[in-house]
Amino acid sequence: MNASSATVSRTLVGRVLWYLPVGLIVLFFAFPLIWMVMTALKQPVDVFSSPPKFVFAPTLDNYKRVLSSDYMGTVGNSIVVAVVSAAFSIVLGTLTAYGFSRYTLRGQDNLLFWILSLRMLPVIAVIFPYFLLFQRIGLTDTLLALMLVYSIFNISFTVWLLKGFFDEVPREMEEAAKMDGYGPWGVFQRVALPLVVPGIATAAVFNIVQSVNEFLLAFVLTQREATTAPVALLNFLTPLGLDWGGISAASTMLVLPVAVFAVLVRKHLIRGMSFGQLE
Amino acid sequence: MATLRLDKLNLVYGGKGNAATHAVRDVDLAVGDGEFCVFLGPSGCGKTSTLRMIAGLESPTSGEIRLDGRVINRLYPGERDIAMVFQSYALYPHLTVRGHFELPLNAHKVPKSERERRVAEIADLLQMEDVLDARPRQLSGGQAQRTAIGRALIRQPKLFLLDEPLTNLDARLRLETRAALKRLQSELGITTVYVTHDQEEALSLADSIVVMHDGRVQQVADSRALYADPVNRFVAGFIGTPPMNFAPAVVQPGTTGLKLEVAGFVLPLTTEARPGVLGTGAAVTLGVRPGDVGLDGAPADGMPRGRVVVVEPLGDERIVSVALGAAPTADAPIWKVRAPKHGPAGGVAPGDLVGLTIRPRGLRLFDAASEERVA
């Protein structure tokens, strides 16, 4: 064996040793998703077969059934609620986080903790107060009610996440913009904001996933009109048993828009997940 | 172009009780039109704080800042017509070099055609045409530095501030950039305030140097005057490499005038040393520049002497450290002396007893208590 082929085989061995465990980890975490997609394509008889079938004749029956039901309307509700509440909490959260990061406020630490404590609250503890409140002001079974409640929970997370990002923006960069002739808003918009885009992308994904997943509040606060997809999945629980094929097809369609969004912002997401580290 | 005046400028950080730090104390200063003024001092001396007050990034606790006679204390930084280069350059990772140049023009709503003309002009001036579309992480240290300078100069400010701009460059590039900066400043004739802790930088760049210490201005002078006529012991010790040699001394009556008793030897105080107000018995600190002391291999009787402690070879010359006294004690003052390699004491080694010849014109005396210059 000559020297160059030795190097090739060494790098080949190195690659296998690297990709094998990575592949196994990915498979482990992606397995439920893969299983869901496979179940969505199975005939009812294949769904329950034992041992489980990995090779089967695929069918689109489950998708047809889901598409012809009113489920897609609830997916629409979920997406509208998630996007609006994420947008609202990002706008408010970004401004709040910038304020906390750049200005010294009286009782700043207490305020920040109070904001965080919103997140610590178990949803079940506030669910009936919310229900009574929305009933009183006539907002039950409206998308607006869900948008408001989700925004409240999302803002606390967004403020904490983005404060960390703003803290990492060097002061000198903002001072340089001040010297260049920008006022406080210009400094925020031209310098601070573009530098925290990874943080905003991360917050957006977390907020959207959170809202799309949420079940308990949506279950209590909506009846028909504003029902979201996680609640609508209950309809697949029939007197005849669970329609696993239908649930899987429906879930796939709920996951798809979120996955597409995550792929679109993935460039920022990787830097966002590593928390700051500008260049 | 513009003149800058500082009147009784003070800056106190913290403000409450003992925690307050008086960073800048009663600074008075006038910088003339087109002048290159350098603030020089050790870290924490208040030089950067003063610069930041001029820039508007820090509000003075008291005092006035005037640019062309107009008080600018209360103006927002962007309204002062002052540009600044930061030590870290403060470049934005999301903007290209062109973006950096355009940013200040956009802030002042300069029309597009004029903007393009000025960007081309500044890129030409700084030789940055090739990297206009590069982002900061693609730039070398020198290019990043020129980007910061270009961003500052592009809107033709009245006053140009630089905060230790050469610190992050390697030694060779620092020398090149220093020369380029000096040329640029004199070509543009722009009034400049430059902060550094590096005296070599200050001496080579400045029309006038402001030496600061403990928040106060110690002396404002050109490089020659600072070196030859320091007003106090701090300035004397801070300017010059190696620094001035000091030794405690007492003034005594001599046969033909006053004499100085230092570490067991006696020096006549000649008229050249301007005795002034010195009286018999006064405790002073004697200061002598390393270049004003000569080494003699074999000390004659009564001649100042000392023992060699360290010899540092530096090419053509050596820096010899000598502990003063015939039998120096552990706390004897140590003087550094420049000795030419082929001079009379070219071959001295640690432990040797050597004689010291002191040029009478090289004597500087400072009051032992106040440290002010007395002769």
Image: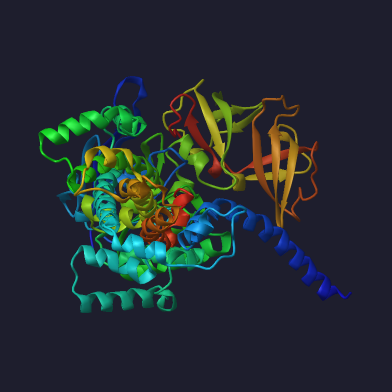
Res. B152 in view:
no
Q: Residue at x 32, y 33 (%)?
A: A123
Q: Residue A238 appears at what percent x and percent y?
A: 36, 47
Q: Residue B42 appears at what percent x and percent y?
A: 47, 41
Residue B186 sits in which quadrant?
Answer: bottom left
Q: Residue at x 56, y 41 (%)?
A: B244
Please tell me how many numbered marks the rendered image carries. Answer: 0
Q: Residue B31 appears at what percent x and percent y?
A: 28, 52
Considering depth in this image, is A17 or B213 the residue closer to the camera?
A: A17
A175 with respect to B176 (left or right): left
On screen, B298 above or below A229? Answer: above
Q: Residue at x 48, y 32 (%)?
A: B366
Considering depth in this image, is A64 or B248 the residue closer to the camera?
A: A64
Q: Residue at x 27, y 77 (%)?
A: B116
B106 with respect to B200 (left or right): left
Q: Residue furthest right?
A: A1
A67 with respect to B229 (left or right): left
Residue B48 sits in which quadrant?
Answer: top left
Q: Residue furthest front?
A: A240
